[in-house]
Every structure is written in C-alpha cells, then in structure tokens.
Image: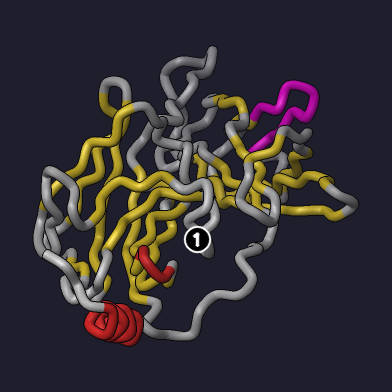
Amino acid sequence: MKIHQPFLLLFIIVGFNSCIQEDIVNDEIDASIRINNSFSNFKVNDQVALDAFFFDNLGMRQTVAFDLKSSNPTTVEVDNSNKTITGKATGTAVITVSTLYGGETTTKETTVTVNAITVNPGGTTPTNNTAKVGTITKTSSYASAGDFEIVAITNGIRITFASNYVADQTLPGFAMYLTNNPNSISGALKIDAQGDSDGVIYKGAHSIDVIGVGINDFGYLTHWCEPFRIKVGQAEIKNK
C-alpha cells in the first residue's frame, strides 16, 4: 500500500505528540558503586569477600580498587588487604566502600546488622546470588508502574512482575530495557518491545527470562518510548 506524503507527515507528527515530554539532553549520570553482597542474614563469624562494581558517569563498568571502612569494627571488621567483611559481634555497623577514579572519589554505604552467633566458628560465606527487587515508577504522564523480583536461573535471570505491573499501551513504540545508565538506551539491553514475536504484556503478573546475563549485571529497569528515545518509567534494582 502506498502512503501519500501528507498522510505520512501527519502520522509522524501525531506519533511524536503522543510521546512528548521534556526530553533528556544530558545522558550523563553520577559515578556510582554498586554493592552486590546481601547482608540480610549476616551472623557472627560470617565472612564474605566484597562483591562490588564501579560505574562511570556514562554507566560503563570500570575496573578500580576499592577501600573499605567500618563504622564499628568491634561489630563488623573489614580487611582491606583481602577485601573481606567479617561479623564479630551482634549489632549494627555501616560499611563505607570508596574508590578514586578520574580524580574524583565515589563512595557507597551499606548497613550491616550482625545477628546471633553461628554454630560454625570457622565462618561461612553467604551467597551473593540472592534475589533482587525493584519498583517501577513513571517519569512522564504515561502509565508505568509495578513491583518485580529477579532471580538467577540456568544461564540467565528471570524477572517476575507482580499483579500491579502496568506499561502504557498507547505509546507508539514501547520498549523495556535493563541498563546501568537510566538516562540512555545506548548500551542498554532491550528485553521486551512492541512487535516482539512473543508480544508485549502491558498489565498484570507475568515473567520474562533473560538468557546470557547475570543477576548483578544491571542496576536499572526502564520503560521507553523508543522511536523518540523518551523515558517513561524506571526502577532501581536493589538487593532483596
């Protein structure tokens, strides 16, 4: 079918207006540290090696050296030589992880609560592959919401969306991404989009399996109006 130029122009204008908002001019973000360790069930004598990533102001992962400090070494002890964190006594401490990159220092704090003593005085190594969670919130006037959980599966991850999930079906080109820079789709991983052979679920509970990625690879899940590169929703992915 031949589309006449006036009609095509009208379609483009209508599509743009249906996805309009204040566009993002600068896609840079603050450099950040992501601590992948989960301390939800940390006990006396538990010891874990720091598992952390550093991302520059474009959301690109960089290899850096980390420095660890504990606000309460009698409760939680850190060993900077081996980058380990050890529960010494019941109580709470704040662990500060920092690094110097590009002449600027970036820090990240995490609170560690040490619970009752374990039966194994030799210490244990809690897993870092615990579930991740997030809550999508809209960044425009278009619907974008919902809670989700991410767990590791064989060769990938499974994202399970709760019944309160919603994406806007009126967008001219909906797409969902995993990313480390929520302000850009450059370098992001598209995991669902309008026109996919499996179709798009715009509302309600469902799950998506993403093969070839790890549970700690991404820090954000985002919704976009893809043709015009306008973000309509985002969620930070956090330890459960």
Q: In the rendered structure, does residue 213 fall within the stretch colored magenta? A: no
Q: What x and y, as percent, mark residue 201?
A: 12, 57
Which portion, as a residue range, is magenta? 76-84
Query: Who is closer to the viewer here, 73 or 127?
Result: 127
Q: Image point 47% across, 37% down: which residue?
A: 217
Amino acid on which the number 1 mark rests in the picture: Pro
Does 49 sit left or right of 103 as displayed? left
Q: Image point 52% across, 60% down: which residue?
A: 184
Q: In the rendered structure, does residue 83 fall within the stretch colored magenta? A: yes
In this figure, which colouring scheme has been used for the structure?
secondary structure
Count of numbered tags: 1
Q: What x and y, as percent, mark residue 20?
A: 38, 84
Q: Is residue 142 visible?
A: no
* Element assignment for label 1: loop
Q: Image point 16% across, 68% down: which residue?
A: 2
Of all residues shown, which one is farthest toward the top?
A: 122
Query: Who is closer to the viewer here, 110 or 124?
Result: 110
Of all residues shown, which one is farthest toward the right?
A: 103
Q: What x and y, as percent, mark residue 229?
A: 44, 67
Does 172 sit left or right of 220 as displayed? left
Residue 200 falls in image quadrant: bottom left
Question: Vertical placement of 87 versus 195: above or below?
Answer: above
Q: Image point 32% across, 65% down: which residue?
A: 136
Residue 14 falls in image quadrant: bottom left
Badge 1: residue crowd in 10 Å (few <14, some 14–19, many ≥20) = many
For disc 1, the marked residue is 182
Q: What x and y, as percent, mark residue 59?
A: 61, 51
